[in-house]
Image (cartoon, rainbow, N blue to C red):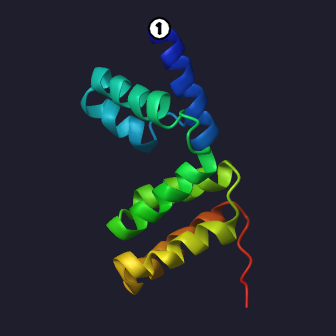
Amino acid sequence: MDEKELSNLARDTAARLFGPPKKGEGVYAVWRDFDPELAKHISRFFVGRLYSRDVLSQKERELCAVGALTVQKFWDELHVHCHAALNVGASAQEVAEVIFQMATYGGVPCTVEGLKTLKKVLQERGQWQNQP
C-alpha cells in the first residue's frame, strides 16, 4: 500500500469511527499542535493500519477500547470511544455492559465514572432514555 492509499484508508476509517473531522478538535489536533509530521504518522498507524484491520469487527474493536479506557480511567478518551462504538453498531446496552464488566478489573468507582461518561455521550446524541 502506498502513502496515498494509507492516508485515504486512515481518513475513511477515522470518519467511520469518529464522524466527520472537526477542525481544531480531537486527539489528532492535539498531536498536530505539537508535531504535524509525527501526528500524520501516528494517525496513519492507528486508524490506517491498526483500526482498519478486519480480524476484529469495528464494533468488537471499539468495545475493547471502551473496556480498556474504563479501567485506565481515561475519561476523555472513553467519551470519544463510546461515540465511536455507537457509530459502528454497538448498542448503548452493549457499551454499558462492557463498562459494568470492568468493575471486576478496575473497581466500582471506575464503572460509575464510565457509566457517567456513557450517559453524557447518549445525552449528546439525544439517545438517553432512563431505564428502570
Place of residue 89 in the rendered image (x, y in percent of width and height, measured from the top left): 71, 52
The answer to whether 60 is drawn above or below residue 73 in the figure is above
Quadrant in which the C terminus appears: bottom right
Badge 1 crowding class, 10 Å Cα cut-off, few under 14, some 14 to 19, many 20 or more, is few
Tell me which residue sits at (46%, 60%) in the image: 78
Amino acid type shown at disc 1: Asp
Place of residue 16 in the rendered image (x, y in percent of width and height, measured from the top left): 64, 38
Tell me which residue sits at (34%, 24%) in the image: 41
- Judging depth in this view, the residue of 28 and 105 nearest the camera is 105
The residue at the far front in this view is 55
What residue is disc 1 on?
Answer: 2
The answer to whether 41 is drawn above or below residue 113 in the figure is above
Tell me which residue sits at (59%, 74%) in the image: 97
Would you say residue 123 is visible in this rendering?
Answer: no
Place of residue 14 in the rendered image (x, y in percent of width and height, measured from the top left): 55, 35
- Judging depth in this view, the residue of 131 and 89 nearest the camera is 89
The answer to whether 42 is drawn above or below residue 82 in the figure is above
Q: How many labels does the image show?
A: 1
Would you say residue 33 is visible in this rendering?
Answer: yes
Q: Quadrant of residue 127?
A: bottom right
Place of residue 61 in the rendered image (x, y in percent of width and height, measured from the top left): 53, 49
Secondary structure beneath disc 1?
loop
The residue at the far bottom in this view is 132
Q: In this view, does 74 lie to the left or right of 86?
A: left
The residue at the far left in this view is 34
